[in-house]
Amino acid sequence: MEVLDHLLLGLSVALTPINLAYLFAGVMIGMIVGIIPGFGPAAGLAILLPITFGMDPTSAVIMLAAIYYGSMYGGTITSILLNTPGESSTVASTFDGYPLAQQGRAGPALVMQAVASFVGGTLGVILITVLAPLFSQVTRSFGPPEFFLLVMMGLATLIVMVGGHWRYGLISALIGFALGTVGVDLETGQTRFTFKSAEMIGGIDFIPIAIGLFGLGELYYALYMGLHLKGSGGIVRYDKEQRFWPDARDFIETKFSLVRGSLLGFAIGVIPGAGATVASLMAYSLEKSASPTPEKFGKGAMAGLVGPEAANNAASSGAMVPLLTLGIPGSASTAVLLAAFVLWGLTPGPLLMAQKPEFAWGLIASMYLGNMALLALNIFAIPLFVLMIKLPYRILAPAVILICTIGTYSVNGSIVETWLMFAAGLAGFFMRLYGFSPAALVLALVLGPLAEQSLRQTLTISRGSFGIFLDRPMSLWILAITAVVLTAGILMRRTRRGR
Amino acid sequence: MQVSRGPTGGAMGGRALRAGFLLALLFVAGWYTWTAFTELNYLSSAGRLGPGFFPRLIGASLVLLLVYSFFADLRRDPPEGAISPYWRTAAVVALLCAVFVGLLDLVGGLLAMVAFMAGALWFLNRGRTLQSALVAILLPLALYLMFSVWLKATLPRGLLPLPF
């Protein structure tokens, strides 16, 4: 009953006209961010952060969260119509989505992906509603050793689960940690790696780094791959009037895929570092192995589209659990959300739900409404988004650079940070080219100070002994979960390599 | 740098570029580690772990991993193989971007935006002069109004600030 009371409180916050307007703006922007290839939610959120400066904190976070989960919906439209995922978590949707479109079933595929995204997103939010308060209670007993292990778990999972070479993933994370040490040491007050510059004393803000790595870096990479020469030639045409709606068979065939994808996606999303991309790829494998007709996968199986779609949206909801209850983001996108929380004086962690219920539950309630708005948008506003897909990259690319640059400058009015973003863009290009992990770098940069502080506190408590990680039951649990997740990740990599 | 044509030469170009990137990272990581060991204390004055503890751990691990990666991957082809024939496009756009950032403090946000868009669209959107001109003027103007007027965000004013 307590949960229902909280949810009602949240709905009363989310249903105010101003919050509804920001929510709707957020899902629209999220859809657009998801549609633009090579422009992920992390860059989109980081660039749009300054727009929220004049807003009420709850409205701001409602809008930013809507951009985050809205991008999960948007990315699939290009996967289905262009065979180009709008962002990494919709890669699995190209496997069967594009073949379906080629067979003249683009309409049913688009509607079914919207339904799957809605079911995944909404089931995910229901699970947050039930589980987040429980998580919050459990994590109140966490001390420095547990926080250090959670940071390590998130990074290790990200490195092992997501593509690229694990060694380069580890190097990326170490670079992020190194950047995180710039500035004043919180315990002694000594400055580190600041070149005696006043601008560096506060440390390296991760916003320019995130915009550079995910905005500029991805864009340079897209140009390097010749995306600017492609028009909308590859787009699959579809008929809005005829054969737009899915038939009963589509729903009957995929009803279990919806549930399986949602549950798997949420479980993966809760694990820091795993994220929506891993969830959608795992859901695709699960659907293929559970299907009586696995030979149809890759040739236009509706379950091959529905399962991953439900999973990536449920995972984006699941990723909010560690963020809200521990203050630990599981991905680069949730790291930007964390920055937004901090910017507004909100400290995500075990006490957030108890101390700021109107904020936490307002956000959760808004996610129910956001998923409904996205379902309607994805079905009725498809022609609008198809128009966006037709926008040539040769015009889109300079426009994105413009927004990245001006967005970065406007955060703190700093030209140094703008140059930093430019440098991060170049580094991001090479990282993308050679299989490094920009997400691990950003996550390590954000979590670096927490990791350093908790490790130093842990070793002070234990008088220098690392045995403390094995002495505490909660630490042992985290270590055990990490071992299971990493083993699953290594097996997944081997299976992928074996194919 | 020349665009490599043959498969072997192309792959070698890709390997050389990656080796260069790893060496650049190694150089920065080396400096970071050296600073951590020479300028930052391992223990604080109170006898606890000091400001140098974590950077030393990170720096040393980074240097070791980079050295290992440099030699281990020297003979392995990078994931993308040969250097793309479109590398010049990416390089020119990156250069234009650097000029854009440089112009921000010099001529102010609005003029720098218009100059960048005009340059980038002249390069990427050739043959569509009217379309490029319209986008190069209207988009910066819309962004300027959004950031400066609506959001009241800080935009660079330049050495000769605009009267509005």
Image (cartoon, rainbow, N blue to C red):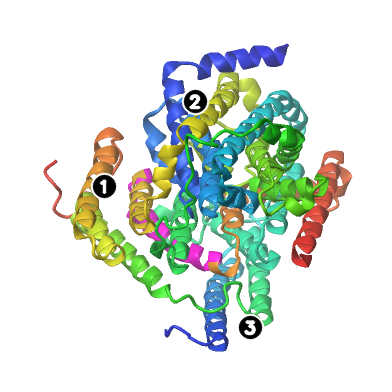
Mark 3 and mark 2, same subunit? Answer: no
Specify the segment rendered in magenta. Answer: A411-432
> Circle 3 sits on which residue?
B74
* Protein chain holding label 3: B
Query: Mark 1 and 3 residues: CB-CB less than 8 Å, in contact?
Result: no
SS for tag 3? Answer: loop
Who is closer to the viewer here, B99 or B5?
Answer: B5
In the rendering, at what x and y percent does residue A235 appear?
Answer: 47, 53
Residue at the spot 44% in from the left edge and 34% down from the top edge = A28
Mark 1 and mark 3, same subunit? Answer: yes
Residue B92 highlighted magenta (yes or no): no
Separation (CA) of disc 1 from disc 3: 45 Å
Horizontal placement of A25 versus A487: left or right? left
Separation (CA) of disc 3 from disc 2: 51 Å
Disc 2 marks a residue whose amino acid type is Thr
Which label belongs to residue A58? 2
Query: Mark 3 and 2 residues: CB-CB less than 8 Å, in contact?
Result: no
Category of crowding for the residue at label 2, using alpha-carbon neighbours closer than 10 angstroms: few (below 14), some (14–19), many (at least 20): many
Which label belongs to residue A467? none
Question: Which quadrant of the figure contains the C terminus of chain B?
Answer: top left
Does residue B133 sit above or below A346 in this rendering?
below
Does residue B75 sit above or below A180 in this rendering?
below
Who is closer to the viewer here, A129 or A329?
Answer: A129
> Circle 1 sits on which residue?
B139
SS for tag 1? Answer: helix
Magenta region's main secondary structure?
helix
**Sequence-first disc among 1 and 3:** 3
Mark 1 and mark 2, same subunit? Answer: no
Separation (CA) of disc 1 from disc 2: 30 Å
Which quarter of the picture shows residue B87? bottom left
Does residue B130 sit above or below A370 in this rendering?
below
Horizontal placement of A392 versus A206: left or right? left
